[in-house]
Image (cartoon, helix red, strand yellow):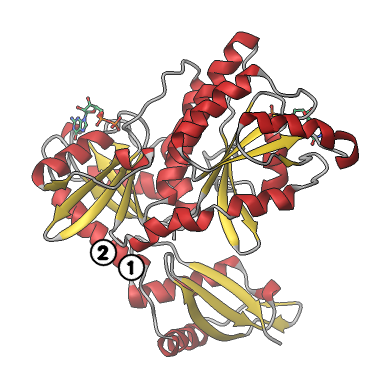
Amino acid sequence: MSKPIVAIVGRPNVGKSTLFNALAGEKISIVKDTPGVTRDRIYADVSWLDYNFTIIDTGGIEPESDNIILKSMREQAEIAIETADVIIFMTDVRQGLVDDDHKVVQMLRKSKKPVILVVNKVDSFEKYMNDVYEFYNLGLGDPVPISGASRLGIGDMLDEVVSHFDEESKNEEEDDRPRIAIIGKPNVGKSSIINKLLGENRVIVSDIAGTTRDAIDTEIVRNGTEYVFIDTAGLRRKSKIKEDIERYSIIRTVSAVERCNVAVLVIDATEGITDQDAKIAGIAHERGKGMIIVVNKWDAVEKDDKTIYKFTKEIREKLSYMPYAELLFVSAATGQRLPKLFETIDAVIENHSLRVATGVLNEIMTEAVAMQQPPTDKGKRLKLFYITQVAVKPPTFVIFVNDKELMHFSYTRYIENKIREAFGFRGTPLKFIIRERK
Ligand code: GDP
Ligand code: GDP
């Protein structure tokens, strides 16, 4: 279900970014080719053996003076404790153990999250192994020696990381209640929406033992169904540095979205859609989550008969990579159309895990191919042999073709549209995997 999150924490210059880049490879996150979306190296998807996880680099702006290093590390540790399933605490064999390391480790230990002690820059095991032993003093068990730069020991480190996943993810897998992440910039009305929903429905007080994360989950019962709302507004960083605040907000969004079935992106009607909204939307899109865009503060906008049309057009243009997203105009202040939000959530959750029988899919594909011939290139025509749905959340289809190169994006989009015409799938992205069969 939800992908685990692994955070890297450590002093400046121990090699956090180097390891992050080694793990992330080319697969750096944040939607490519999407206007208004920059490619920050804050989080990335990693695959190791059969495991997929998201890695986050908690280090923001590097502190310039020694006396604020500890403060900055404490902030990193807090973010990691709030958002991660497993924490990598990175030290540097060349710098050796320093006092700050002990202090931060104390914090991490209190959190009861699994912490893996990594000693970096062990470029040669022969030469440096003796220096690794002093790190036992941190009381975190066996230090894992690696060299991020020369990619030594990374496999053993990842084995250690993934060994903590099963226990962590089990709890959530048994929990099949719909999970909804409310995401968006500050001040768009995320808390107001949750409070309004709370006011009108029964609330369960969480008695799940445990992690810090549960503290920000709100459970609501409506018509006998329990929903879990994951709020990203609740906690705010005190940092004065704009880049740090943004980094933190992105990490929180990634972590909330990772755990949800449906993301509700809240936009402020009095501002219209902005670049920052698009960046946040991109996080949900690339994670394959159900998507509802809520334009809030609708009460505060002067309206005529074209206003909704104008808003819709602007949003659809800016978020052209997610035409499937549902769109709602609401007001947390008056409660206008908030009941509709629940209906939409129900529908999107259903669509996100909808399965279509292979026979029907192939009928649709055959008909689509008959209506619009597949493209040719250098005298060779694309042939589509077979389609089948291999997964849900999001619905994922494999299409077998004669030549992958010939299956252009636009023809895949055409097939997608035909499937959507037949089954709707509103609010959910669809994934297509193209395979060759000679
Ligand atoms: P960060 O501040 O923790 O993100 O550290 P960086 O990844 O920016 O690395 C700090 C410095 O250590 C850079 O000059 C890296 O090239 C160097 N470095 C990182 N990993 C290794 C390593 O495994 N071995 C050696 N010798 N140097 C490394
Ligand atoms: P958050 O940071 O996204 O959680 O935003 P808040 O819920 O704290 O709301 C930010 C501000 O917008 C507050 O002053 C709210 O009173 C106001 N606000 C929220 N929803 C609405 C709405 O539907 N209409 C109007 N007019 N104001 C709203």
User: What is the CA distance from the residue labelled 1 to the residue labelled 2?
Assistant: 6 Å
Whereabouts is ligand 2, in terms of quadrant? top left
What residue is shown at x 80% (from left), y 46% (from top)? Answer: 152
Q: Name the quadrant of the C terminus.
A: bottom right
Residue 123 appears in which quarter of the rendering? top right
Q: Quadrant of the N terminus?
A: bottom left
Residue at image location 29% in from the left, 52% down from the top: 327
| Local SS, label 1 | helix
- Image spot of residue 405 (x, y percent): 70, 72
Q: How many marks?
A: 2
Where is residue 300? Give x, y as percent.
18, 31
Q: Which residue is mark 2?
A: 347
Q: Tell me, yes or no, whether the two marked residues, 1 and 2, touch with CB atoms within 8 Å.
A: yes
Whether residue 321 appears in this view of the structure is no
Identify residue type, mark 2.
Ala
Q: Position of residue 342 (x, y in %)?
A: 20, 55
Residue 261 in view in this figure: yes
Q: Is residue 334 left or right of residue 57?
A: left
Query: Percent from the top left, x then y, of residue 172?
Result: 38, 56
Relative to the observer, which residue lies in front, 77 or 432? 77
Q: What residue sits 34% from the left and 75% below the top? A: 423
Q: Is residue 374 left or right of residue 309?
A: right
Relative to residue 229, is residue 80 depicted above or below?
A: above
> Which residue in the protein does label 1 denote?
351
Q: Nearer the viewer, residue 104 or 77?
A: 104
> Which circle marks residue 314 in the picture?
none
Q: Amino acid at mark 1?
A: Asn
SS under mark 2:
helix
